[in-house]
Amino acid sequence: MVVGRDEVAEVARWADGIERVHQCIAGRFRRPEPRRWALEYLKGLLSPVERKNGWQLAEQAGDSTPYGVQRLLSGYVCDADLVRDDLRQYVIEHLGHGDAVLVVDETGFIKKGEKSVGVQRQYSGTAGRTGNSQIGVFLAYAPAKGRTLLDRELYLPRVWADDRERRREAGVPESIRFRTKPQQARLMLERVLESGVPFAWFTGDEVYGSDRNLRLWLEREEIPHVMAIKSNEKLWALTDRGPLQVRADRLASQVEESEWVRCSQRRWSQGSPGL
C-alpha cells in the first residue's frame, strides 16, 4: 500500500491536534499514569476500532488488559466539569465564530441492568423505542467550519432523584437534583453565556420548544432561537378580541405564503437546505 505525502501530512496534523487537546486537560490529572491513559483514551476514541470498550481501547493502546482504561474512567480522581470547561475554551479558540448555532438534543444509552445512574424504561431515540436506558442531554456547537459538543447533562428521572438509598448506592452527589430536559438545556446555555462562547442562535426539537418557561427565558436573555413546537401548542396572539391563546397550526395557517422567509441552514447541516 502506497501512502501519499498529503496523507502522511494529514496524519501528522491529527496526531499534533490530539496532543494539543491532551495538553489542555492533562493538568486535571495529578499523576503521570492517568495523564498517559487520558491521551491513549483520546487516541482510541478517534481510532477505527469498531467497539470502543475497555478491552479494545486497551488493545489499541498496546496493553494486554483493560485495567488502565477502567481505572481512568472509574478510579482516578478528576473533575469532569473542569475538563469540560477546558475543552470548551479549546473550542472557542479553534472553532469559535459568531455565526455558530447551538443545538440541544438528547440521546439514549441502552442498558440491561438497574444500577447505572438514571436508568429506567424510557423512550430512546437511539433504539427508536421504549426500553431500559439512560438519557443524556447534549449541547452541540455548529459553526461554519466544524461541529463539536460543548456540554452534557445526564437526565436523572424523578424516581431516581427521590430515592435516597438508590442515589447513595450509585454515588449520585446530593447536589444533583431532578431537572426536566428543558431545564438541563437552560443550565447548559447559562454556562455558555457565562463563558463567552460566540454564537448566532439556538435550536432544539419540540421537547424543548414546547417548554414555555424555556422560551420565555430565551426571550428575556434576547437569545435568537428557532425551536419546533407541537401543532396544538397554545401561543399568545393579538386578536380582534384582545390577547388570546391560539393553536400554533391555526396561527401558521393565517400567514400568507409570500410572508414566509426561508432561512438557509446549508452550512450547518447535510440534510435539508432550509428551514
Image: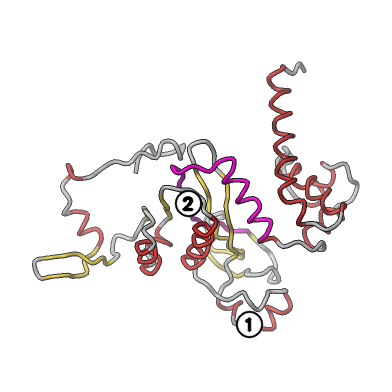
Q: How many marks?
A: 2
Q: Which residues are magenta?
A: 82-109
Amino acid of disc 1: Asp
Judging from the image, what secondary structure is the residue with disc 1 in?
A: loop
Binning the other alpha carbons within 10 Å of mark 2 as few (below 14), some (14 to 19) or many (20 upward) gives many
Residue in the picture at 36% in, 64% down: 220
Q: How is the image coloured?
A: secondary structure
Q: Quadrant of the C terminus?
A: top left
Vertical position of residue 17 compared to residue 124: above or below: above
Instruction: Depth check: give the residue in front, 260 or 195.
Output: 195
Residue named by callout 1: 163
- Is residue 84 within the magenta segment? yes
Instruction: Depth check: give the residue in front, 166 or 72.
Output: 72
Judging from the image, what secondary structure is the residue with disc 2 in?
A: strand
Residue in the picture at 17% in, 70% down: 243
- Looking at the image, residue 182 sits to the left or right of residue 35; the answer is left
Amino acid of disc 2: Val
Q: Position of residue 198 (x, y in %)?
A: 48, 48
Mark 1 or mark 2: whose residue is earlier in sequence: 2
Residue in the picture at 72% in, 74% down: 170
- Is residue 167 within the magenta segment? no
